[in-house]
Amino acid sequence: MLNRTADSVARATPEPLARRVRGISDKGLAWLFISPTILLLLAINIFPLFWAIYLSFTNYRANRPNEVVKNLGLSNYRRILGDQDIWIAMQTTAHFVFWTILLQTLIGFTLAWLIDRKFRGHAFWTTIILVPMMLSPAVVGNFWRFLYEPQIGLFAYAISFVSGIPPTDIQMLSNVSLAPWSIIIVDTWMWTPYVMLICLAGLRSIPEYIYEAAEVDRASNWRQFWSITLPMALPFIMLAVLFRGIENFKMFDMVNLLTGGGPGSTTEVASITLKRQAFESWRTGYSSAFAIILFVAVFGLANIYVKALNKVKQR
Amino acid sequence: MKSTLKLTLGLASAMLTSTAVSNVAHAEDLTLCWAAWDPANALVELSKDFTKETGIGMKFEFVPWTNYADRFLNELNSKGKLCDLIIGDSQWIGGAAENGHYVKLNDFFDKEKISMDDFVPATVVGYSEWPKNSPNYWALPAMGDVVGWTYRKDWFSKPELQKEFKEKYGWDLAAPTTFDQLKQIAEFFQKREIDGKTVYGASIYTERGSEGITMGAMDVLYSFGFKYENPEKPYEMDGFVNSEKSVKGLEFYKALYDCCTPPGASNSYMGEGVDAFKSGQVAMHMNFAFTWPGLQKDENVGGDKIGYFANPKGPDGDQFAQLGGQGISVVSYSDKQESALKYIKWFANKDVQAKWWSLGGFSCLNAVVKDPNFPASQPYAQTFLDSMAIVKDFWAEPSYAPLLQASQKRFHDYVVAGQGSAKDALDGLVKDWTQVFQDDGKM
């Protein structure tokens, strides 16, 4: 069928062109079709990566086009690894990634488990739960910034109603201890539905007969959960953790909109530091080195994690 | 069929010709780049006269303040041709001059007999010269601006509040002349019920992302004795940036933030300050003078309800204020430099400058600001003059961006987040700034 179509295309093609098309092997034709994509990828992904690697060894600054570019060797890398502020930013990132993943996984899985019970109206509630995920991070950031306002924000009034603390004392974005949690709350609110969806897919992939066999063996619900549900859904949970981990490691928009990295540097995650170095301080070489370090860190961690995921799947 | 073809061809040619003619007509249109704010709207109005006089059309590219530096510095660094004229921030002048972004205007000024002596000296140094205090001009002073204060005159004049204040502090409640007085007033108003509403002492700059907290803290630090460097030895900062007086100044700024600002005002700059004042939240409000015409016209807080005062004196009687404002430059990558220079020449004219002031812009021309009628021309005119006489500016070095980022971080970490001491913050700042100048090969 495919050959006939190819022949008819070749016959319909003007003779000189048809001769050329007939002369190309399947492999050649395949390369012809994928080469634009490959060229595009090379231009917008691979070339910038190698260019950034090159810049990371220099003192190049994008705002000084006329300045002589000097090779600094490993100096940028040494400075970054010895910079206390960078390590603080990495700790802030780790704190943010840890808590968002933990909360999103716990709540997401619980919601998925509940939705999987297929109670009356479960489809409606699934849709409602998914709404935050469908919003733009810019909208969510601005919307929560108003909610957190100590003088007019609903969040402060809600907490005040429950706790009796005056709303003006609940300064989520200004308080050093509360600001990191304000971002964790928003990220959890927005992305838990995503984790829930993946977990739900995992739960729905467990064959019903396994539970029926467990029922025959008189296994308790608790036992079924620990021995069937959790192990069989685990690869899906781990996949959700991987996706959210990578996303949150490079989190920028929400932090920028909610706190801008403040108060002080309390919520300055690595991506905010990187942006400041690259586009506000214009230390292009230095920030390229930082970007490469972050890339290697994420790539390395993701690799280890994927290997672990494969092991879990093989069990 | 033939006639239909002819008709079609005729119509197509007419359309092409009309497009070409209109393109020719707009070929010399100039694009002026600036921040999106009230004075920019006044400039649009003013520039209509330029188009009338010269036939050169004007297009405008205005970007909100939060993206202003990013957007236009990127444009200049990439040698973009979007802007023929740019009103760039005062701190950009060093980088723009050294990197060849701006056209040097000395020859043009000589040819057109535009003298920098005709402009307010502080604005010439701040907006036009690089290196500073040398006769190398890269811009024409365009928009004078300075950090000053507004206050609620109606609240200050309430007899019951005046009485209570006098009993508590022993002096009459009025616009403060020292920072000590300013803090007392701010404390007095903090969380006070006025007209059934809880109000707060003062709105000050605390913004982290761009330049807010640096502009605010410096505005106070100067009058406490802060100096950027050893006047005898450039770039020697230890003992000047982190002097005892500077430490006291920064401690004062933190104390003011802690005691007397509205809840949640941890990331507040020009817009947030205006909102706080307009919504009747604060008794005093630190902001650039460009906000004053808008506030003066405001129905709720303007008119007789608002008063203005220049930055108060520090403990030793020193009185300085943070310079704002910008000069107008010709972009060296523009293909329309000749027309752009015509605009500069037109803009330097006395009548144009007088109209500029009347429309809400802040002229820097001596002939306008030293006119005997000037102080009475607007309720804030005298405060503007007083403030412009005491200005100081942040570094205008080519490396101003990393210098600014360092101060933003150090000040915010201490003032808002309460990390470390004022001494730690300023010692750290000396370290950061030294590193920047070492990287530049200046130390």
Image (cartoon, rainbow, N blue to C red):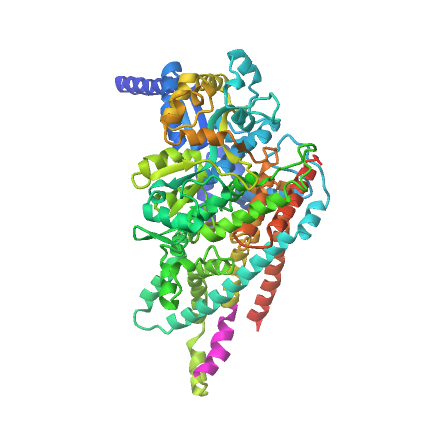
How many numbered callouts? Answer: 0
- Image vertical order of residue B229 relative to residue A188, above or below: above
Magenta span: A221-236
Viewer-nearest residue: A146 or A275: A146
- Image vertical order of residue A94 relative to residue A276, above or below: below
Task: Look at 44% across and 16% down and name the residue there.
Answer: B349
Q: Is residue B261 visible?
A: no
Task: Look at 46% across and 43% down and name the residue there.
Answer: B269
Task: Say left or right for A130 vs B418.
Answer: left
Instruction: Determine if the magenta segment contains residue A227.
Output: yes
Position in image of residue B439 (x %, y %)? 68, 39
Position in image of residue A68 (x %, y %)? 68, 32
- Image vertical order of residue B288 relative to residue B11, above or below: below
Magenta span: chief secondary structure: helix
Position in image of residue A45 (x %, y %)? 57, 45
Viewer-nearest residue: A81 or A159: A159
Task: Look at 50% across and 30% down and name the residue there.
Answer: B88
Instruction: Determine if the magenta segment contains residue B47.
Output: no
Viewer-nearest residue: A142 or A14: A142
Assign the C terminus of chain A to one quadrant of the image: bottom right
Q: Is residue A75 visible?
A: yes
Q: Quadrant of residue B101?
A: top right
Position in image of residue A275 (x %, y %)? 55, 46
- Image vertical order of residue B289 relative to residue B160, above or below: above
Viewer-nearest residue: A134 or B169: B169
The residue most toward the right is A73
